[in-house]
Amino acid sequence: MSLMKRRELLSSLWLAGLGLVAATGIWTSWDILRPGAAKGFGGKIRAFPPETVNDTGVIQVSAARSYVTEVNGDIRALSWKCTHLGCKVSFCDSSGYFECPCHGSIYNRVGDLMSGPSPRGLDEYPVEVGEDGLLYIDTGVVIEGPSPGTVTVDEPPKGPGCAQGTH
Ligand code: FES
């Protein structure tokens, strides 16, 4: 092989390698930055159409470890993790409040702390409607729950609590 042909071959291989590296970089960046991509917990979780949400109850979204509800026209995703020591709170249909099974903290439907040892209301995750018209919960961003004493909505318990001795 002549010196000229060897140089041309090496030059072609170099350009092909450069092209491959660039293509891989673009592919990886697109995968990371793609808007609205559904990921596991810690990323954006695709949920359901926003019309599904109402202002009387909550919808559990297990993949986002949260409950979705509506407050004054805004859709909110509340973390199901009790702000005391992290137990999973459950929603009690009869009272319309969240109850923590561990040490008895009670939160109203919008996550305000009503009683118990927790230092604040339930934390929240930002929500947005994606290009596909579905609701996305960004579990990579935590918005700290409201301070004790904050009452966002005037919703007394609808009835008896689910845990014994509550309300
Ligand atoms: S972990 Fe919920 S009240 Fe303690």
Image (cartoon, rainbow, N blue to C red):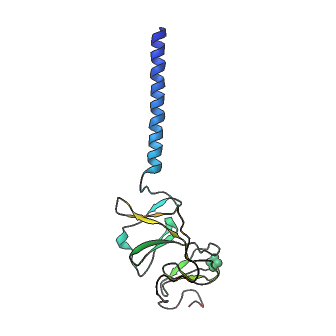
Residue 121 falls in image quadrant: bottom right
Q: Is residue 111 left or right of residue 70?
A: right
- Who's the residue at 44% across and 41% down the image? 26
State ligand 1's quadrant: bottom right
> Looking at this view, is 142 or 162 the one in front?
142
Q: Is residue 63 left or right of residue 54?
A: right
- Which residue reaches farthest top? 2
Could you tell me residue 68's position as x and y percent? 45, 73
Quadrant where the C terminus sits is: bottom right
Residue 55 vertical placement versus 46 (above, below): below
Q: How many marks?
A: 0
Residue 93 vertical placement versus 131 (above, below): below
> Looking at this view, is 38 or 125 the one in front?
125
Could you tell me residue 87's position as x and y percent? 61, 74
- Who's the residue at 46% across and 17% down the image? 9
Could you tell me residue 86's position as x and y percent? 62, 72
- Who's the residue at 38% across and 60% down the image? 130
Residue 82 falls in image quadrant: bottom right
- Who's the residue at 49% across and 9% down the image? 3
